Amino acid sequence: MHTNTLIALVVCASLSACGGARCEWPHEADAVIDLTNDIQRRHLSDDAHGARTFAVRYGDALVILPSGPEAPGWNERVGVHREAVSRCEASLTSAIAATHHVAPAQIRAVSSPGQ
């Protein structure tokens, strides 16, 4: 696993563990990504994976899901959870895009399976 992703995941885990449901990408120095460079493309992919993981943890901290699909309110809470994850992931992807001077669509493209 890429070092930056590992750092991001540790920060994410610690924020969720402390009860701080915040959707913020950890500070990373501005660095233009050259998408023709395999190593830099991998860095961007690792950042995208970290953002997805962080967003799910954020959703988990924000929305307590009932014990199973048969529990009252399950569908509503799952919907709220998915929306929170989606919103957070979009926000984090925008932050990564700004840091690396790429478009969010380029981040999604390098993080798609088969890339």
Image (cartoon, grey):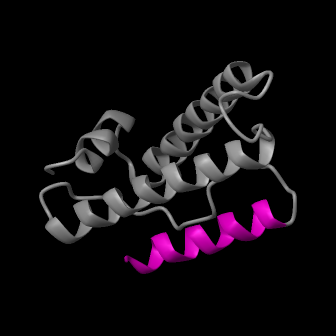
Is 31 included in the stretch rendered in magenta?
Answer: no
Left or right of 52 in this view: 115: left
Is 2 included in the stretch rendered in magenta?
Answer: yes
Pick the residue in front: 15 or 82: 82
Return the residue found at the far front. 70
Left or right of 6 in this view: 85: right
Q: Quadrant of residue 36?
A: bottom left
Left or right of 44 in this view: 87: right
- Residue 45: tell me if it is visible: yes
**Where residue 14 sits in the image (x, y, percent)?**
75, 70
Q: Residue at x 51, y 39 (%)?
A: 94
Majority secondary structure in the magenta region: helix
Q: Quadrant of residue 112?
A: top left
Left or right of 16 in this view: 99: left
Q: Which residues are magenta?
A: 1-17
Quadrant including the N terminus? bottom left
**Where residue 43 sits in the image (x, y, percent)?**
33, 66
How many discs mark residues in the rendered view? Answer: 0
Q: Residue at x 71, y 47 (%)?
A: 60
Q: Residue at x 65, y 53 (%)?
A: 57
**Where residue 52 sits in the image (x, y, percent)?**
49, 49
- Residue 23: tell me if it is visible: no
Pick the residue in front: 29 or 89: 89
**Where residue 91 sits in the image (x, y, percent)?**
58, 38
Q: Quadrant of residue 79?
A: top right
Q: Residue at x 68, y 37 (%)?
A: 68
Return the residue found at the far bottom. 3
Pick the residue in front: 113 or 75: 75
